[in-house]
Structures are given as structure tokens and as C-alpha cells.
Image (tube, grey):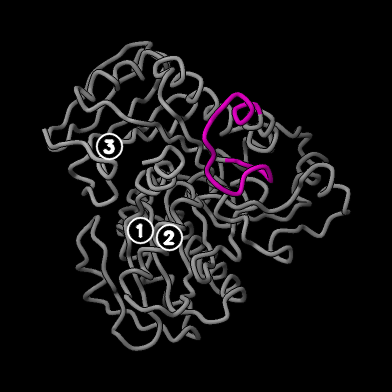
Amino acid sequence: MPEMTPENQPVLIINCGSSSIKYALIENTEQPRNERIEGLAENLGTPEAKLSGHDKAQKFSIDMPNAQHTHALQAILARLGQQMPMAIGHRVVHGGEFFNSAQRIDADILQKIRELIALAPLHNPANVMGIEATLAVFPHLPQVAVFDTAFHHSMPPKAYRYALPELLYTEQKIRRYGFHGTSHAYVTERASTLNQHQTPYGWLSAHLGNGCSTCAVWNGQSVDTSMGLTPLEGLVMGTRSGDVDPGLHGHLQRVLGWDLPRIDKLLNKESGLLGLSGLSNDMRTLEQAVADGHAGAQLAIAVFCYRLAKSLAALSCGLPVLHGIIFTGGIGENSAGIRAQTIALLPHFQAHLDTDKNDQLPRGQEGRIDTGAGLQLWVIPTDEEGRIAAETRPLIGL
């Protein structure tokens, strides 16, 4: 075993959902993804609960019927073997206005995260559960919270304020916060590094997965983003509607008698690609269905790409200079068709897609897909866990 130095002491990254725990043990920022110990505990609390992943090159899958979060963390610990972490970094979705950077977790920080549950009722409760369960298993390890919203604290008021009465902002903190911050931060920093120049860069980043968002980044700082108070605002997503007329809520209540929980379920779980297609929220399924002539899938993809292009065009207003567009996330990294359709909707950007490079880029690989003239077009696989580790280390002296 190599000698442990501050540079390669492993950090355990935890991304906890209401019924899942995604984890990765990261030794250093240069460690390739395929050499990490990482995995996913899913369906927790059900008979189908299991833990799967890979210990560096070796894949595994373990059934854990009815396992809860603490049991799953103990199983994860067992998979680490002798490579015990020196610290733990947690993904926390919403940091509100409390946190504009990562924070070492203590009782006060944890209480503030609890207080933010009202702003993120679908996400922060699971994040709190993960922190509490991890503290029970690793009571002596330093732990750090890295917030999705923190990267967007650099947005100016013209970007984050809603046109609502002042008291709703000053007293209730109703504003645009933005999410996917660790992903947007990682891929835009990576693109700037790959360019090897000192000039400030202006990037448009498109994180496209089951959840989707865009972000305008100038000189390493977020200046605008598509998500808002919650992760529902903005683009069409897997099951989320993205932007709708705010009057829709009142209309559904008056015409159908729906209450707010029913409308919330509609917009978060029954809309997006799933609602438009009537078939699936999985882009791979929809692209295959398009090839088979499925009209709903065709419509879903057309709306998805058009709304994505509209968002990129709008966010470009926040950049003094636009150098390029970055595609990331499961769809952004793997769907050449979505990238091509989106770029085709932006002819005024002077972006020239190299069709061969786009079609032939291997899955999971980074690369430029433009012709070399005009706007840069990048595909950069995101590494949210690596970014969380990078933000965790300085807070615990590594």
C-alpha cells in the first residue's frame, strides 16, 4: 500500500436520497474514475434494497432486503476495506442564503440545514438523514457539507430576484437559487483548463440528465442559471415540467378542483419527457421510439431541445463574451442527437458542429465537437463527487 500523504488521503463522498445513497472514495483529484471505490445503495427500506458498484476494477452487487440508511452505510464501510476515509463530504441540495461555500458540519450547521427544509422539501430531508446516519457510523471523522446552491451565490440581483413584493424576499427569502452547482463548476473549470489560456472565459453549461439545468459562467463564477427557488424551474426534464405559466395552478384548481399537493405531483413527477411522450422519462427509450415512428417521443424530444436552446440563448445575455457551450450529464454526455438538434436551433451563435466528431465521440469521454471555427463546443463528463472532494479537503486540512 502506498504511503499516505495529505495529497492522497481518501475522502468519502456521500450523496444521500430518501431511499438511496450514492458514494465514492476519492484518494486525490487526479485519480481516474475507473480506479475509485464507488457505488449505489438503492431501494432502501424495501425488500428490493441492494448495494452495487465497483471496488476499483471489480464490480459487485449485494442484496440487502429492507436495509435502512445506517445499515447501508455500515455495508459501504465494509466495502472500503483498509482504505478508511480521513473525512466525509456530503452533497446538500439547498444552502439558501446561509451558505455561499462548503461548510464543516457541526451542530449549528446541521440545524441550519434542517431550517432550509421548507425551501427544499424533496431533497434536504434526505440530505439531513444522510448526515445523521453518517455521524452515527463515523462519529469521529470530520464531515463537510457542499451545497448545490453555493456556486450560484455570485449571481447579481438582476438574475436572482423575482418580480415579487420586497417582503417576500427579505422575510421569506424567496429568490432564484439555482442547483447543479458542483457540476457546472467542475465542467466550466475543466473547459478553461483545457484551453490553457489566462483570459477570462465565458461558458454556457448544459447539465442534462433526469434533472436538467443550464448555467452562464464568466471567469469561473455563475452569473445566471435556469433553475430557481426550486429545481422545478427552467428546462424540460425527465418528469419535471420546467417553466409553466404560474396561472396554471389557479386554473387547475378552478377547473379540476385540484389541490396544491396534486398539482405539485403533476409538475414534479408526471410531466417533462414522461408527460409529453406518454411513454418514458428515459431519453434512450425515447430516441429508440422516435426511430420507430412514435409521435409522442418525437414531440417530447423536439420540445426538450427547443426549450434547451431557448435557455442557452437567454443565458448568453449574462456573458460579456461567449467562448463556448459545454454538454454534460447523462444525456449531454451520451446523446449525439440531442446535441446536434440543440446546436441546429442556435444558428446565430455561429456554432459549427463537426458531425463526425459528435457522432463518434466515445461514451463517457470528453472532447471538442466543433469544426474549430467559431464557438467552442465541448462534451465534458461531469464529476460532482470529485468536485465535492476538492471542496472538502481544504476545510479539514488536507
Q: Give the residue drawn at x 29%, y 74%.
A: 369
Quarter of the image where the N terminus is located = top left
Element type at mark 2? helix
**Dot 1 or dot 3, earlier in sequence:** 3
Q: Residue drawn 36% across and 74% down? A: 377
Numbered circle sitting on residue 290: 1
Q: Position of residue 9 (x, y in %)?
A: 27, 37
Q: Residue at x 37, y 55 (%)?
A: 331
Comparing 234 with 3, the one in front is: 3
What amino acid is labelled 3 in the image?
Gln
Q: Residue at x 52, y 51 (%)?
A: 276
Whether residue 78 is in magenta: the answer is no
* Residue indicated by mark 2: 298
Q: CA distance from mark 1 to mark 3?
A: 48 Å
Q: Amino acid at mark 2?
A: Gln
- Type of secondary structure dominating the magenta stretch: loop
Q: Nearer the viewer, residue 139 or 334?
A: 139
The three-letter amino acid code for the residue at tag 1 is Val
Which x, y percent locates residue 92?
52, 37
The quadrant in which the C terminus is found is top left
Give the spatial CA distance, label 1 vs label 2: 5 Å
Segment tinted magenta in the rendering? 94-111
Percent of width and height locating residue 39 = 28, 32
